[in-house]
Amino acid sequence: MDELRNDVRNEPRDDLVVRTDGLTKRYSDRLAVDGVGMTVRRGEVYGFLGPNGAGKTTTLRMVLGLVRPTAGTATVVGRPAGAADVTARVGALIEGPGFFPYLSGRDNLRALARYRRLGDEEVERVLDLVDLTGRADDRFKGYSLGMKQRLGVAAALLGSPELIVLDEPTNGLDPAGMADMRALVVSLARGGQTVLLSSHLLAEVQEICDRVGVIDQGRLLRESTVAELRGGVTLRVRAEPEDAAIAVAMRLAGDDGVRREKDGSLDLDLAADAAPELARALVAAGLDVHEISARERSLEEVFFEMTGDQHTTKEKVS
Ligand SMILES: Nc1ncnc2c1ncn2[C@@H]1O[C@H](COP(=O)(O)OP(=O)(O)OP(=O)(O)O)[C@@H](O)[C@H]1O
């Protein structure tokens, strides 16, 4: 298991529901996915996060065996991706589900269920899970985008697969529908199923995911728990004059441990219990201290720092 990354090196293979090694996809001269090694553990909600065109959907398609990798491997529930005996153990919603427009939602699911030798009661179970029972007899073509999305998720849940892969599951849902979908994803994982989802909604990933893989320009930049990625608590400081405050802050937090926010406050890589020492140092240096508070970085800030997105609100001061 030498090729596994450190954090999962000692885990039994059974605990990894998805594992990719050097997974690569090239479309003519475009490297859509570049050597991705990701690991999804049993029973977790794993968030695959990245800007548009980062390679999320292509990676998920390779994990599902829908696209053949140019190089590398994907192992799903212990078997090569796309192997015939894997498909029944994996449910997926990826880039708009294909349903018969003139059939009702219920009949569409029944057709899928029959093909998989599942009974009608299974159709009713998944309709209820996605809260679509009341509209199940309406034709698919009359569904709103959100209802189509929920029917797609219902189809992915048929047969209670071990792994559920959802590409942007809250796409098209209104705020209440998004909250329902998030609650459903969490409850699936609590019930022992594994969920691999992609999203560009950072707050959503922060709320429901146990671990996150950050992908940009085809490369997996980082894979860790949400808490690790956010890097714990930092101290926010507002004191004047600013230059003197930066000098004091750097003395305590180190040259690389101080960032300046657009509103003029400073963000320091210091634990919350360093606040009194910081206050004393600022006052001893004759500064006016307006604010010292502990704050947690949001996943959004970390993400923009990692992907070098222009929306970042911070600049390094060193
Ligand atoms: N079939 C294809 N042929 C050629 N290029 C493709 C194909 N599929 C994807 N690409 C390219 O590969 C790159 C990654 O695309 P992909 O759809 O995987 O990204 P994504 O992270 O899912 O983006 P989004 O969030 O916008 O859906 C993009 O530059 C895309 O244009």
Image (spheres, helix red, strand yellow):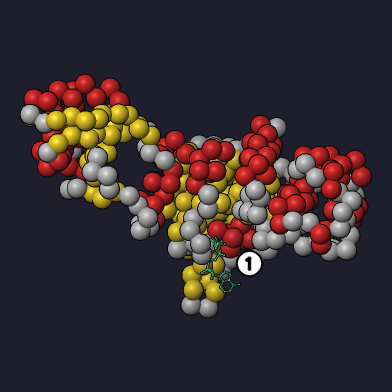
Q: Which residue is mark 1?
A: 68
Above or below residue 215? Residue 225 is above
| Residue occupying the point 67% across, 39% down | 180
Q: Secondary structure at mark 1?
A: loop
> Could you tell whether 177 is left or right of 291 in the image?
right
Residue situated in front as seen by the camera: 26 or 13: 26
Q: Position of residue 190 (x, y in %)?
A: 66, 31
Q: Quadrant of residue 119?
A: top right
Question: Residue type at mark 1?
Answer: Arg
Ligand 1 shows up in the quarter that is: bottom right
Residue situated in front as seen by the camera: 215 or 62: 215
| Residue occupying the point 87% across, 54% down | 138
Question: From this viewpoint, which residue is outermost toward the bottom?
Answer: 28
Q: Quadrant of residue 132?
A: top right
> Could you tell whether 121 is left or right of 270 in the image?
right
> Could you tell whether 34 is left or right of 308 in the image?
right
| Residue occupying the point 44% across, 43% down | 299
Q: Check disc 1: other Cα within 10 Å, few if <14, some if 14-19, many if 20+.
A: some
Asked whether the viewer can see residue 290, the reply is yes
Q: Is mark 1 within 8 Å of ligand 1?
A: no
Q: Quadrant of residue 310?
A: bottom left
In this figure, what is the number of numbered marks?
A: 1
Above or below residue 150? Residue 294 is above
Q: Position of residue 134 (x, y in %)?
A: 85, 43
Q: Position of residue 315 (x, y in %)?
A: 26, 50
Q: Position of residue 307 (x, y in %)?
A: 39, 56
Asked whether the viewer can see residue 122, the reply is no
Residue situated in front as seen by the camera: 74 or 115: 115
